[in-house]
Image (cartoon, rainbow, N blue to C red):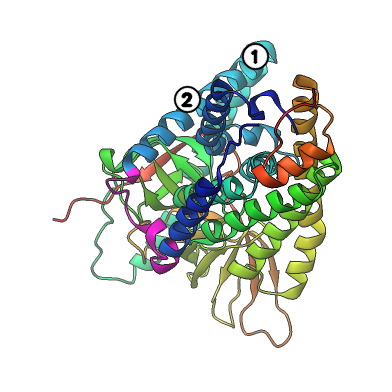
Amino acid sequence: MAQSVSGYRRVWLLAAGLAVVIGVLIFPDWPRRPAGFFDRPVTAVFSVLQGALSSAVSQVRGVWSGYVFFVGLREESRRLQADLDRVTLERDTLREVVEENRRLTALLEFQPSATVPLRGARVVGRDPSRWFQAITIDRGSRTGTVVDLGVEVPTGIVGTVVKVFPATAVVLLISDRLSAVPALVQRTREQGIVEGTFGGRAQLKYLPPSSDIREGDVILTSGLTDAFPKGLIVGTVSRVQRAEGELYPDVEVIPSADLSRLEEVLVIERPPPS
Amino acid sequence: MSLAWSRGGTRQADVVRRLLWGAAFMVVLPLQTSVMDVMAIGGMIPNLPLIGLLLFAVIEGPPAGFAGGVALGLALDFFSASGTVFYTVLYPGLGLGAALIGQLTANLRAPMLLTVVASASVMLSGAHAIWFQPFDRAEDMMRWLAASLGPQALYDTAFAGVLYAVGIWWHPPARQSLKDHDDFFTAGRFPGSVR
């Protein structure tokens, strides 16, 4: 009987595996480092396979929903959704302009915010582990993507770039519990931090204890990080609870962007230093 | 678990088997990130890397299961947003454990495999909760246990069962003799059908 794994090979396999495990324990931050000489071929193969599979799935989905199933309805729905996105964006922008104008009348000097360059990207995958709310986009270091860039869609912000490979990048969604985005309440201008939850929702933390926040309030980015300029829509307050003995109100936020159906996104590029 | 390409005996069969496992390792993560979303039920997606590792470990034995766990763990930590070595530490243990259980219960193929997958799914979730401590409050953890842990383990187990059934249908298993069982302990995997 032929043995596929001889005694020596078994020892070598175990020893090699143990060496790798000990190696990563000694250098625990290796997953956060940029792809090096040895990682590049692996990431290249992974990106190609991921892109091909993602494209195939999109094609199949497109054929099914576009040509076989309700051709007209789908087109009309897409058009109406695009209109709704645009009108929502305009409405929230106007609200923000009104609030801004009210505050600016009291100021003597006003410096308008610079326009931010955007770059389109296609979503090619989700996080391989089911524990993290993250997506993979087809923009990597070759196209100038770097860690900590913000990502948005017309309806709101999506997340932040946390890992960059040559052809792809991983974006941590705002609904992930490791995500934290400085934000403010549009109506009251109170500032806090939007964090993700384990259940894939978001919550606004560290508001002032006396905050007057209510359900339906719109949450915007506060511009305190480089990733997101001030005034981008984060979401809407869906629940406010004030538990006895708790300093901060418990505020649940529904992200404006539909994070479960992302197909194309916009990467917010940093303007070149002046 | 005597799939045709897992049988020893000829050099060609060994080469084919290794090539197939290699290809499976290459595509399992892209499949999980790009295709498995299609199978989402209530936000739950079958954990294909975990199921694939357990199948591989049970079929190929402890050393290969351990090495496969190291490789898959490294890849998961590298491509996921975790930024830690969680999978590199955990997956070799899962691969080794599954292979050892597979050896001890070699005559109970389907029940053993399904039990291993269910246990590994629950253990992975528990280990994640301990490692990352994602819950601010105990009630959140209880809600998660009720809503996610059990259903996810069931879904993973059912998916592994379907894969196993397809494997059985494709290559019906051969009866194993006591000698085969002894060989399995020696070689770390099933040698092939009884002739």
| Mark 1 lies on residue | A72
> Which quadrant would residue A20 be assigned to in this image?
bottom left
Q: Image height check: is A254 above or below B40?
A: below
Q: Are marks 2 and 1 in contact (CB under 8 Å)?
A: no
Q: Is residue B113 left or right of residue A49?
A: right
Structural distance between the alpha carbons of marks 2 and 1: 28 Å
Q: Are marks 2 and 1 on the same chain?
A: yes
Q: Quadrant of residue A109?
A: bottom left
Would you call the spot at circle 2 few (<14 residues within 10 Å), some (14-19), or many (20 or more)? some
Q: Is residue A39 visible?
A: yes
Q: Residue A15 in the image: state x and y as whole percent.
A: 48, 56
Circle 1 SS class: helix
Q: Secondary structure at mark 2?
A: helix
Q: Residue at x 68, y 55 (%)?
A: B97
Report x, y in % for residue B1.
75, 34
The chain letter under disc 2 is A
Looking at the image, which residue is at 40% across and 51% down?
A161
Q: Amino acid at mark 1?
A: Gly
Q: What percent of the width, then of the height, locates residue B167?
A: 75, 27
Q: Residue at x 66, y 64 (%)?
A: B127
- The residue drawn where x is 84% and y is 35% is B177
Q: Is residue A19 left or right of residue B169?
A: left
Q: Is residue A38 magenta?
A: yes
Q: Bounds of the magenta span?
A: A24-39
Q: Amino acid at mark 2?
A: Ala
Of residue A104 and residue A114, the one placed in the foreground of this image is A114
Query: In the rendered image, is residue B133 in sight?
Result: no
Read off the residue under disc 2. Answer: A52
**Observer-nearest residue: A233 or B109?**
B109
Q: Is A86 placed above or below B123 here?
A: above
Quadrant assignment for the N terminus of chain A: top right
Whether residue A168 appears in magenta in the rendering, the answer is: no
